[in-house]
Image (cartoon, grey):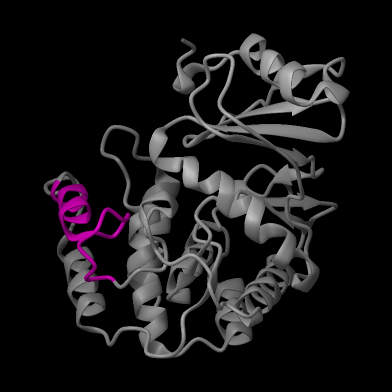
Amino acid sequence: MPDPQDLDATTVARLIAAQCPQWADEPLRPVAKPGVDNSTFRLGDDKMVRLPRFERWIGQVTREQRWLPCLAPHLPLPVPRPLAQGEPAEGFPYPWSVYEWLPGEPADAAELTDLRQVAVDLAEFLLALRAVDATDGPPPESSNGFRGCDLADERDSPVVRSYLASRIDRLDGILDTGPVRELWDEALATPVWSRSPVWVHGDPAPSNLLARDGRLSAVIDFGTLAVGDPAVDLIAAWTLLDADSRKVFRDRLDVDDDTWTRGRCWGLSATLPDPATMTEKSVADLNAVLADR
């Protein structure tokens, strides 16, 4: 049986031929930068195939198929358009999807000409996403990594106490972790989101934001889509923006102090460096989170 964590084009081609024969003759090739949760292949010039690598993430398939067509008309930037949903077959044990291919470079590899404009465009996208009726939307759950959950939630999110504590502990003696723990304590003491849950992307990392001609052009990878606390989507403030554009981002979103503090905790989860792969940029990103009250 093919290993979902190590798929090759031969297996994916068999899935396409059996379930989407109209595309069987189109060239298939892996994307240059594979994902962590999903394997992705370019199909022809205008499509991509996305297949979960782990059982935990199979709910992402049905969630994206169900909700992206509902959300897309309300959003100011393009998002992936599902073209087909595949079923387990050919030895592959999970459902999978075919999407329209969106052109552009990941924002962390693109030359963004005006970060203030990027901040405005991203804020407008998130505001539009939050404004969509969230009735019956998916709550924080295992298959979206509990994105949008409360910070004190003990389930397996990037900010769950046990996981974040171990990541901080590994930095003891390497960095001054006192300010990190102070921020974490402050965030845990901050009131939870008390308004109605709203739609969140869940992982607006630079690799999930596409750019063309110096501007944001699309938002991709909605596997962590959820309805919950919008603080999680503030991660982009510290992984993509600088101090000046971060202020523009916060002002345009009209973020209150409590939500900003919770967002900084999510920012910790995205910027805490691994001691084995620490770089000047990762330390700078962490310091920005710590400084940005």
The image quarter containing residue 31 is top right
Q: Position of residue 149 (x, y in %)?
A: 35, 69
Q: Position of residue 246 (x, y in %)?
A: 56, 73
**Residue nearest the viewer, comparing 181 with 137:** 137
Total numbered labels:
0
**Residue nearest the viewer, comparing 118 with 79:** 79
Left or right, 37 with respect to 169, comes to right
In the rendered image, the quadrant that contains the C terminus is: bottom left
Question: Which residue does the image show at 77% across and 50% down from the upper left?
Answer: 81
Left or right, 47 with respect to 159, comes to right
Magenta segment includes 165 = yes
Is 105 situated above or below 215?
Answer: above
Is 21 situated above or below 159?
Answer: above
Magenta residues span 151-169
Does the image show residue 26? yes
Left or right, 270 with respect to 244, comes to left
**Residue nearest the viewer, comparing 79 with 205:** 79
Question: Which residue does the image show at 87% across and 24% down from the upper left?
Answer: 22
Q: Position of residue 134 (x, y in %)?
A: 57, 77
Q: Position of residue 258 (x, y in %)?
A: 36, 87
Is 148 situated above or below 133?
Answer: above
Magenta segment includes 120 = no
Question: Which residue does the image show at 61% across and 48% down from the upper left?
Answer: 221
